[in-house]
Amino acid sequence: MDTLLTADAALRSPRYRRKSSTFEDAIHDLPEKAELAPAQLYSTESGRLFHAGRIVIATVGLPARGKTHVSVALARYLRWLGVKTRIFHLGDYRRALVGHGKDVPDDYFFVNASASSVLLRQKILKKCREDIYDFLNHENGQIAIYDAVNPLAAGRRSLAKEFAKHDIKCLFIESYCDDERIIEENVRSVKISSPDYQGWPEDDAVKHYLNRMSAKIPHFESMEETDLDWIKMINAGERLIINNRSFGYLSHRIVFYLLNLHIKSRHTYFARAGVTLEEESYKADASLSPQGVDYATKMTETVMKHREAEMEAIKEKGGPETELKPLIVWTSTRRRTVETSAFLSARGYQVRQRSQMSQMNPGVCEKKSERRIRRDYPDEVEKHDLDPYHHRYPRAESYHDVAVRLEPIILELEREQNDLLIIAHESVLRVLYGYLMACNAADIPFLSFPRDEIIEIIPASYNNEAKRIKIPDLPPEIIPASPEGPKSAAPPSGFATPVPGLGSGMVSPRENSHGATTPTGVKTPPEQDSANDISIRIHDVV
């Protein structure tokens, strides 16, 4: 992408977050202005890509079968590619209409409900459909994900016909599950993350949710309609059945993604690589310094102790007596990340090297101070200040380039069922974190990963949650985050997002050389004669 074409979108990118039912990552944000997605390859005037028109994806399945998980994961991937996608959880509309902290009628979830409950359901459904039409017709939306049970074949046919009248295609995705272990895991996951059960005792929440499930089981009809487009996921992705009546490009892309998706819980950890003997050099691919070896040892110990403590906490809360999930370690092929993982490999953990996870190439900026870069490449610096995400210096990479080459890693990350530790350069961690927490492209260059903290991403049905794990006793000089432009404050250890500086979309305003603040994602060039410029690298290699 040409930086001059993306700079205006970067300037207009929203700097705040509004939530539907979650406050952890940005997947439920409702941006009001146009913005470019992190891995978007091109843009159109309408905002719709791949000549695919408008599509409603309607979920099908009993409660605790993973419908919401599939909806959120699919929206995350499509929005990453630049497809304007929004999730419409029918449960959100129910909570909004009934009121916070209030209960629906006792028979609301039952098929043979009273007239008042049926009227309430129709009112909620009407409001949800109106918002779907408004998004697709007036906000240039491309895919609306309608997250509901949709249990009956007659109702699904009626739904498809209704959308067809408005020239909107309808694709049904059923999450079918008869594995009791997966269902139980989903029930407990929903109990933790669903707004319906905030503040409930665990046993009461599980019992109530199981009653809700049993109310629908006798009246549920699995997808068998030959006249509709549908995808059936069986037991969390073990098998897919597809009925293709009129699939387009996006429908096939969705099938490809679902082939890599599962709904089993997995924790992902992000850790920086250790410092090297030639810290300023990208080309040298140097080995770890003694401080780097010390960091690798302490990082390994911290990860091990944290996982054991989490398992003990689960047992204390009455959770199942299960062993820790296996931990898989991913690194790039560069020496510093491989050597940082050596202590884990020595303990028997499987380490896999991924060439796509190599750090961002700084090109001509390698080993140069910001003052020298501004002197030698003033035009490039101006473009970079306008859009630090998409701009690339001569013979260098941009964050957008990194995001595009990381797509195979993202798909493999979705496919991985074990716990995962990713050891990589900060530029790679910024992009992967941006995907998992649905960050704006303009914010990704400013995400902060100090070396004395490990980031843990905890998945749930409605959202992902991030928290920081402190690595103790590291020397202060190796801790600071890489200086990719002006740095923003990092949240203290243990805080979950959204917080300024880590995936919140609300990075703290920064001061320019005259004491004025600038909005996130738009950098103000510092004074060229500043004495501090020499120690600041625009494209770090640490």
Image (cartoon, rainbow, N blue to C red):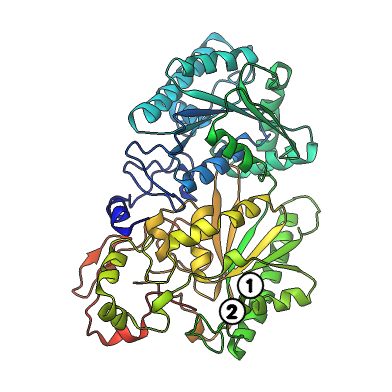
Please report the residue visible at 54 percent of the width from the left and 58 percent of the height from the top: 466
Confirm or deny contact between disc 2 and disc 1 (CB under 8 A). Answer: no
The quarter holding residue 192 reads top right
The residue carrying mark 2 is 472
The quarter holding residue 68 reads top right
Q: Which residue in the rendered view is the most extreme toward the front?
A: 395
Instruction: Identify the image quadrant of the N terminus.
Output: bottom left
Q: Left or right: 268 with respect to 438?
A: right
- Above-or-below relation of 541 to 105: below
- Residue 515, percent from left and from top: 20, 72
Q: Is residue 157 visible?
A: yes
The residue carrying mark 1 is 333
- Residue 121, percent from left and from top: 51, 18
Q: Is residue 117 visible?
A: no
Residue sitting nearer the eye, 506 or 364: 364
Please report the residue visible at 49 percent of the width from the left and 58 percent of the height from the top: 403
- Residue 104, percent from left and from top: 54, 24
- Above-or-below relation of 129 to 73: above
Query: The residue under label 2 is which amino acid type?
Result: Pro
Crowd class of label 1 (few under 14; some 14 to 19; many from 20; radius 10 Å): some
Real-space CA distance between mark 2 and mark 1, rounded to the nearest whole angstrom: 27 Å
Residue 372's disc number = none
